[in-house]
Amino acid sequence: MEAKTLGLGALLLVALVTAISAQSRTQPGTPHPPPGVAPDITTSASAAQRPRPAVSHRAPLPAVPGASAASAILSEFCVDCHGKGKPKGGISVARLLDGLTPEAIAGEWEHWLAIADRLETRQMPPEDADAFPDDGQRREAVAFIRAAFDQYDARHAGEPGRVTVRRLTSAEYAYAIADLTGIEIKVGVDASSDAVGGEGFANFGDVQFVQDAGVERYLEAAKQVADHAVIGAGPLGFYPAPGKTGLELSALDRIEQLYAARGFRVVSGEGGRPFGLDRYEKALAVAWQYRHRVALGEPTVSLRTLAAREGITGRFAEHVWSAVMRAGTGYPTRLTVDRWQALPAPGGDRAAALARVRVECAAIVKSLVTWPSWFFARGDLAAGGQGDEDPLVFDDTTLSATTSKAWVHALNRRPGRPGSRLPTPWTVHLSVDPLHGQGATVIWRNARVVLRTAPPPPAANEPAAVTRMRVPGPIVETRSLRSVLPADVAARLGFGTSPDGSTLGPDDFATSEGTSFAIDVAAGEHVAELHVDAELGRNREAVARVMVGDTATGPARTPGQRALLGDPASAGYRAFRAGVAEYVSLLPPNSHGAANPADKDPVPAPFDNTYNSPEHDAFVTSVKYQRTDDFFTRNVVDGEERVRLNAAWNDLFGSWPYHDAYLGMLLDHFGVTSASRTITAMTPARIAALPPAAQPLVQQLRAHHAGVMQALRRAEPGQLTDALAFASRAWRRPLTPVERQSLRAFYQAARSTRQLDHDGAMRTLLARILMSPAFLYRLEMSPRSTETRLDDWQIASRLSFFLWSSIPDEPLRRAAAAGQLQESAAIASQVRRMTADPKARRLSTEFFGQWLGFYHFDQYRGVDTGRFPEFTDEVKRAMLDEAVSTFEYLVRERRPVKEILHADYVFVNQALARFYGLDVPVSASGAVQRVDGAQAFDRGGALRLGAVLTTTSAPLRTSPVKRGDWILRRILGSPTPPPPADAGTLPADDKSFEGQTLRQRLAQHKDRPQCASCHLRIDPLGFPLEGFDAVGRSRTAYADGNPVDVTGEFKGRPPIVGVNGLLDYLEDKDAAVMTTLSRKMIGYALGRNPQASDRRLMADMVRAGGDASFTDLAIAIATSRQFRYRTGAADVPAATPAPVPAPVATGTSARAATP
Amino acid sequence: MTIPPSSSAPSRRHFLRGVGVALALPWMESLPAIAQARGGKLAAQSGPPLRLGIVYFSNGVEPAHWWAKGSGASMELGPGLLPMQPHREDMVFIRGLYSQSALASTSPHLGRMNLLSGTPVSLDPDVIRVGTSMDQVIAGAIGDRTAVPSLVLGIEPNELRLEDGLSMVYGSSLSWVSPTRPATKEIYPARTFDRLIGDGTGRVIDRSILDAVHAEARALRPRVSRDDHHKLGEYFEGIRDIEKRIARASQQERLEGWQPTLAQPDMPRPKHELPQDVPAHMKLMLDLMVLAFQMDKTRVATVMLNNDLSQMNFRFVEGVQGALHLDLTHNGRVPTKEAMYLKTNQFHIAQFAYLTERMKSISEGETTLLDNSILMCASSLFDGDLHSAEQLPILLAGKGAGSLKTGRILDYMDKGDANRKVCSLHLSLMDRMGVKLDGFGDAASRLDDL
């Protein structure tokens, strides 16, 4: 074994140098170790000369067999050009030959692989070389290189390598904030703090610099985010509006969301909409199923289970069940209860029975909610229509029960239309609906037909409102009803006698049910009216709904048509009133009004409820909120939802001086001017000095205020706990006990030392959490110096930043907490879940965007819009969307990765389709949509993305060089060196090639040797894309009218013609394309450049081929050793040449002094 | 490395060790000496301090238009320099300076982005490294005498891409606080204004947050690798810098006897967003530079009018069409495009002329702000089209508080390579700014005759 011959000395030397490098790396440029660190290694001048060592924590193997022979061959044929002075192509074979251990070779792996490749493919030595190795020599050298790599792999494959801690990029910061808070907050951490390095990504620690200005931005941003926290009576949350306004709006939002999710309501207030009434139907059906649970085969099922199946709350199901099972309910609840009780028991066919019951339940609900509209005879209000904006209220004012009512019923005209005349005869319907008590009798006294002079006709152009106000003139003639009715009809009405024995006059009659008759009087131009006074009969306990109308049923819009005849003093009326109250509380037709009432909604007592009255309006505008959701709170939500609802209300009341506003209204109402007008000033003594009527109201308000304040205070400890949970999410791991303690102490100090209130202290705490390096940096704790397996939380974090550019979500956190992320299978399943998630769109934006060069394309300013006015901002945005959506689709739908180039679909919206001149149906006007079969119209894949074609062009013309370079660099991964500094240049404009075509200009490359070696590789890849102009549109001719030439010619190869030719060419180079993709993915995922120990992983990914999905490749990375392990500090030698001490300032006696 | 303790112990040394500066800056050793000097000599100073302002423009010049003849009022200027015509007597035209490491670099653009340090740009994609730039060396030495150690301004954001495999951070950064770390370039006028005007009072809460985060540094040390610790040091250092600034701002008294001529800003706070219009943006940034100097908020400022390899579309200049780098610099020697390229050169010089004019119009006692300043205008390339770096286009303006004789042409082209190093100029300028080094970059001597 040659190893032995090297001896101990050599091994020691290698170890020494390795250690020196490590020392140099971690103490860059510090000539002396810092105090407290003993210098255990003496620096050696040779350290700087060493080639980059590869990662290892063991002593490297000695030289590979065949080293000396290979070294001799390479020295002989390569070193002439690739020496140590100014090596050609920047590759110094001579320097490489200085280190022939597997580790040294791996440290320069890409150069060595290139050498092997050039030798094998006979690209080197070049044609004009003086001497060439024979085949055997070529084989020997290549075999040596391969053997070295095999040896290296055997020991080092999969080693994680050195990863510099990564700071969140500006994009990651924004995503993380969005995921943490659930809202989009535009903060000042923008891309101006980013830079790219490594494989071309901003998530590369070595290029992430911070200075105080950057820290200031973070501080500003952290405070801004904290400002969006909702700090109220509920749990900690975030809202798009900041501060107290955010608390108020978020509370309103939370209330409305609960209403929408759980509640139901018919029209109430201006613009109100009915919704959620189907919940009644479901609850009635649930109650039926519960009642017949045995017959339905589920004897043990609970109401709540059934409710959950129907999608209603358990509480609501329980309530409706108790309502329909309630004995002795009165009118009108009885109507519903009886009808439900009458539902048939299920027979043999349970499903059919349930279906029938559902139909009947729907009918029950319809009558339940339409009853008020019938009762009040008020249009389509309670039926769920949208016509009536008056809210539905049951109180003594709206019921307005009375023992008598005088009616004036228009006979020959429509009310409000003074000019109209109806022909005779006029049918009049008197309806009497007994609602309570037996034998209600209505006495109609002094019924008479009155003729009056007509109101003056409407003036020309008179507004309808004025016309409606015109009333008839004085009475011309009065005739008793009895006298104008035919004798048989008059007899039927029984003038002069009453069935209940009341005393009647000759023109009075009595009915105990509805009746109707026709009146035929010659009224001429006069207005005819029926005047009659209705009166409750002898049975004063009865209650009846009475109407006079020209149809039997009503309702009509005419006000005052309905009367509730009853004696408010009677026990019968009180029982009826109780029945209505029972109905409102048990089965209300609407559950509540909006939290912020509209100007037509009622205001609470003692304020004037009249629409448009000053007090009403003052209440609506100054007090703003009113809680009327008692039924909803008690009977629809319970448990956690009720807690949330109450918390939201407390937030709403506590977010602004609600109680002061309310107090002001009360004091104004009672004419109090002297008292202090804040609720906290309302001491018992001050309250006692108020007018007696005001005292209980103010007392109540004060108690309410105290309750709200107490609720807010009680929430404080919970929110502090929430803030710790927030920290745990932000920091992507559980907090240590010390951290928890220190964050709590920080909060306490803010309150005590800095005198902040809870709100202020919480916001400061949140900002402090977001300023922690644990949030801003992707810290991976590795206290030990050896290679360490990452813990579950670190894996979760790596996964989420790799695939989502953000913090882990709940499922990922749960998996981490459960210790599941140590298993490959579990990691793979997370990757599958995560790449299918909508958040994977970020992967497209970040990874594909930076790789393929369309990152921030919406801010691209390289197009001359004077030349291309059609290239609007809208088109630009759509192009970015096109690119991002293409790869989002590819990732989330697990399309084969070969579609990165070969996709047969394109994402466009109308504007972009128009811009591209596509003749395909596109309906999307905003976000882009997928159109399949795109290759047929020359689109699809990365090469034909508008954003790619545009960024690889000059402002005024295309650039085959840029496009060819893009393919070499970004797709094939074999970039050429930069052009020589004095390379000739091309004119800017394709109109001004001085008579030459672009191709003719570029052909000059071939004639200049210093250009040819690269341009012969670049240009043929760019020309096939000449079929697209500088802003990505298909074209067949240049601006000057000459046809485009889409042929790219490599020496000794059939020409590449157009995009399809180019795609065929790239398909042949599949391995190179896959290698590039693998490199980019590894670099992006790991935050470092691929290294020799990644070769096996890369080989696996390349082998997976173009049919693999992005998910497959991501799984390969995420389950790899390099992804799951981390190298500690001490065993990482310098990956860079050790810095030469003090290369800049050489002085020792310099000093700062004043000028 | 050590992360500095949160106490207010003075320590530029910690600062620089923290960033891993690969140079032994000797003046760090003499912090007590500085303090002493301050107490004695500085307190006696009654005149305005010297300021240094550097204006960078990318993509070089057209050599045929870049010349000057004669001296003083009779100096003749080439077409590229015309906007400086009114300021001939206040400027120095310097010809022939160069940087060997830039000239030798194989990277025609990024390899030459070492204008202010003269040290080689790392061509290893894994290693970001240039050299600490002279403005930052000055800021490190005298920055703590003002509210803001130095202003680093720009117009274009950092470009997020690689150029020939190298990070565009080189093309976007002129100032480097350490060989491996660019200074944060501010492109937002409003933020710049706030940084200058924000007095740090009323930042009790901020301070409490920063203190608490700072305390984490100690807890982190045993738990992260040393490399990571090193990287995190940048962050904690930033925190400390702010803490110090807050502390400094709450000390009312000035350390020196001289009072700036302007106590409150004489311009409104700029709008929050970036100006869409490039000339307006540049004017605003230059105004802020003047404001900073006039209020003595800082004494060192650099501004990049554009990034290297800028795609800045010059449509805003009458008669110009196309992007600076691709169309106008590399103009294929087409006469119409050459004419446009000249206009871009003139536009850049006009910005410098505007700055000169503004500073000349502000009096500081018997003198003007310009008299008490040195302004430098330069690009990283000479012939932009050829990426040539055998010499650099450099102009100075201002009398340097009596230390600079203006109205001159200094030609070093045939003085021998050893005597025409741009780093010698830097040494000379640093001398005047009070930072006396024996060597800087590749130079060990001052520029003759300056």
Image (tube, coloured by chain):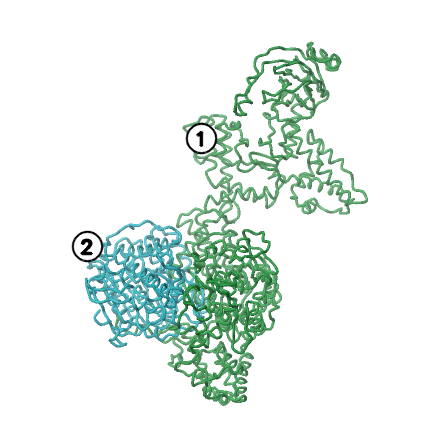
Chain colours: A green, B cyan
Amino acid type, mark 2:
Gly
Q: Nearer the viewer, residue A954 or A807?
A: A954
Please state the horizontal and vertical placement of residue A376, each as a whole percent of the image: 63, 27
Q: Residues within 10 Å of mark 2 (few under 14, many from 20)?
A: few
Q: The disc labelled 1 sits on which kind of residue?
A: Ala
Residue occupied by mark 1? A685
Please identify the quarter of the rendering in which residue A363 is found: top right
Direction top: furthest residue:
A506
Q: Position of residue B220 (x, y in %)?
A: 45, 64
- B429 displayed left or right of A1005: left
Residue B202 visible within the image: yes
Q: Is residue A197 above or below residue A403?
A: below
Q: Are marks 2 and 1 in contact (CB under 8 Å)?
A: no
Of all residues shown, which one is farthest toward the right? A348
Residue wearing tag 2: B365
Q: Nearer the viewer, residue B188 or A1096?
A: B188
Q: Is residue B151 left or right of residue A126?
A: left
Q: Read off the chain for label 1.
A: A
Q: Nearer the viewer, residue A315 or A546?
A: A546
Circle 2 marks a residue in which chain?
Answer: B
Residue B159 percent across, percent down from the top left: 42, 63
- Asked which secondary structure carries label 2, the reply is loop
Residue A788 makes an appearance in the image: no
Q: Secondary structure at mark 1?
A: helix
The answer for how far apart the CA atoms under marks 2 and 1 are is 69 Å
